Image (tube, helix red, strand yellow):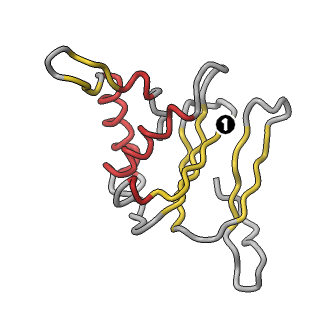
Amino acid sequence: MPVPPSVNECFRNLPGKGRVATKVYRDWIDYALTNLRLQQLPIIHGHVLVNMGFEIMGDRGDVDNRIKPTLDVLTKAGLIVDDRFVVSPVASKLPYVNGMAHIEIWPSQKLTAEFHPSPDGARGGWIFYAPQPNGEHDGLIHQ
């Protein structure tokens, strides 16, 4: 799905109305929901772990300001029951390719994680492995 706007761009305060969603945020929600629904992804019930990688251009974009809009749209899309069931949100700034957010949702469970930084250390991503009955990880890259 597309990278969300920074939470700083999502809301503004209007006199007499309070905090309201901006047009930028509403437009992004519509675009993200369409993108997610076209993928026909299954809902994950119960407590979840969410791995979020954001392709943010430049060094000014904060990764943490992208988490709340992402979790809200995952809930709105019906992929998770509610963001209050997110046990562990993990986020990283990925190398910029086309401005997309790469999201992985796991049922709450024991996982092994490795962080793979870019050569300059300015970006990178988490790779998670699910344990197997024999105690090994599945050997697949989930990102």
Of residue 75 and residue 34, the one placed in the foreground of this image is 75
Residue 69's spot in the image, x, y percent?
41, 38
Residue 114 position, x and y percent, is 76, 54
For badge 1, the amino acid type reads Leu
Horizontal side of 45 relative to 89 (left or right) equals: left
**40 left or right of 135 in image:** left
User: Where does label 1 land, which residue?
Assistant: 94
- Tell me the residue at 34%/36% (across/down): 29
Q: Is residue 123 above or below residue 104?
A: above
- Residue lying at the far left of the rendered structure: 16
Mark 1: secondary structure:
strand
Report the side of 23 relative to 74 (left or right): left
Question: Quick check: 87 above or below 73?
Answer: below
**Residue drawn 75% across the image and 72% down it:** 137
Residue lying at the far bottom of the rendered structure: 134
Dot 1, how many residues are within 10 Å of its Cα: few (below 14), some (14-19), or many (20+)? Answer: many
